[in-house]
Amino acid sequence: IKAQYAQLKDLPAKTLDGIEVSLSINAGLLFDFDQIETTGANGVGLYRTEVPFMVRAEFPDVPAQRTLYEKVLDRANGKPVVFRTIDVGGDKVLPYWGELDEENPAMGWRAIRICLDRPAILRQQLRALIQAAQGRDIHVMFPMIAEVEEFDAAKKLLQRELDREKERGGILPEHVYTGVMLEVPALALQLDKLLKRVDFVSVGSNDLMQFLYATDRGNAHVSERYDILSPFALGFLKSVRDRCDQANVPVSVCGAAAGNPLEAMALVGIGFRRLSMPPPALGPVKEMIRSMSERQVAQFVHSVLEIPRVSIRPRLKAFAKDHG
Ligand code: PEP
Ligand code: MG
């Protein structure tokens, strides 16, 4: 981490007009957790638990997972860690599982879909996490939820593991917060029902943009055709944010957009107050937030939301330049 950003570590991510934004990091491997301290992050907004599964030679059993999650919680030192349950399939393959031979893996058998069809995988993971917590709070987030019923089913598996641990006489976590990744557009159209059930929502803008625009997130030919910095996409995200706010459900963004200063500026402008990003992005995003006026950005972003354009990136860039 550059010295210039290290200095910002203990300073709040507060705009010039006093709006505080909570910045967290995304993590995958154990060493990422040391970055909570070095960046001064509020916690881990997205722990991609499939990453340690991907770098192993075989599927880790419950004791191995438990040991890992214990270390994770220890290193977080009381700061919240959002455990995203295993999200394999799509662009994340487990070498020891073999190829699935799917025509559209991103839209195929992946993430929660695998876990609900093969519940032992999810149950073991949740069991390991509950045991690792030893009474500490846990945050569990389910990926690729497309229907409210899938969230209910996943939460039921979590409850079964909590009941099991109780019967065993184990110590239960003090609080168990359950939430979803909002990354399938269908779920965004079911917020009424969803928001009554979840403790938090995190927008996975990578997959959400991919599915919203039917554009492969890894395909360079289409990567510049649609932009999250468009009136439509920002308006859509704003409507999600407003609905969560009305329901009093904390909402964050943990996709790549949250880690780019320009995108992060726009996200704050449409009302997001929680962002989670790769550790090296935290300093630059914090610096941007500390130099912006929320009121001015919000005013500007709302004024351009009315223009029918594929991208308002150049306008936002010019605005950012004009305003330091
Ligand atoms: C996302 O989809 O935006 C996300 C954060 O998850 P991943 O990139 O791991 O799919
Ligand atoms: Mg995703």
Image (cartoon, rainbow, N blue to C red):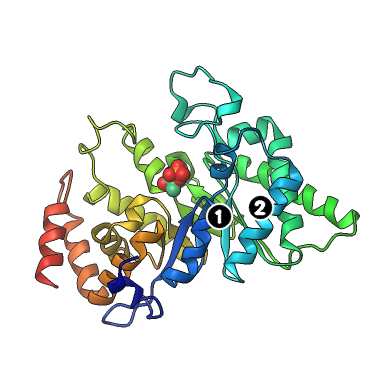
Amino acid type at image mark 1:
Leu
**SS state under label 2:** helix
Mark identifier at residue 68: 2
* Crowding at mark 1 (Cα within 10 Å: few <14, some 14-19, many 20+): some
Asked which quadrant contains residue 197, the reply is bottom right
* Crowding at mark 2 (Cα within 10 Å: few <14, some 14-19, many 20+): some
Residue 206's spot in the image, x, y percent? 38, 44
Q: Which residue is drawn at 63% across and 63% down?
A: 73
Q: Residue at x 64, y 65 (%)?
A: 74
Residue 189 at least partly seen: no
Asked which quadrant contains residue 286, the reply is bottom left
Camera-side residue of 133 and 59: 59
- Work out which quarter of the rendered image holds the C terminus and state it: bottom left
Residue 182's spot in the image, x, y percent? 47, 48
Q: Quadrant of ligand 1?
A: top left
- Work out which quarter of the rendered image holds the N terminus and state it: bottom left
Mark identifier at residue 121: none
Q: Which of marks 1 and 2 is nearer the N terminus?
A: 1
**SS state under label 1:** helix
Give me the C-alpha separation between circle 1 and circle 2: 8 Å
Find out whether the residues at labels 1 and 2 contact each other: C-beta distance under 8 Å.
yes
Q: Residue at x 53, y 20 (%)?
A: 99
Q: Residue at x 23, y 59 (%)?
A: 262
Camera-side residue of 154 and 247: 154
Disc 2: residue Cβ within 8 A of ligand 1's nearest atom = no
> Residue 68, relative to residue 187: is it above or below?
below
Mark identifier at residue 30: 1
> Residue 178, relative to residue 80: is it above or below?
above
Residue 287's spot in the image, x, y percent? 28, 72
> Residue 38, relative to residue 193: is it above or below?
below
Amino acid type at image mark 2:
Leu
Residue 228's spot in the image, x, y percent? 27, 48
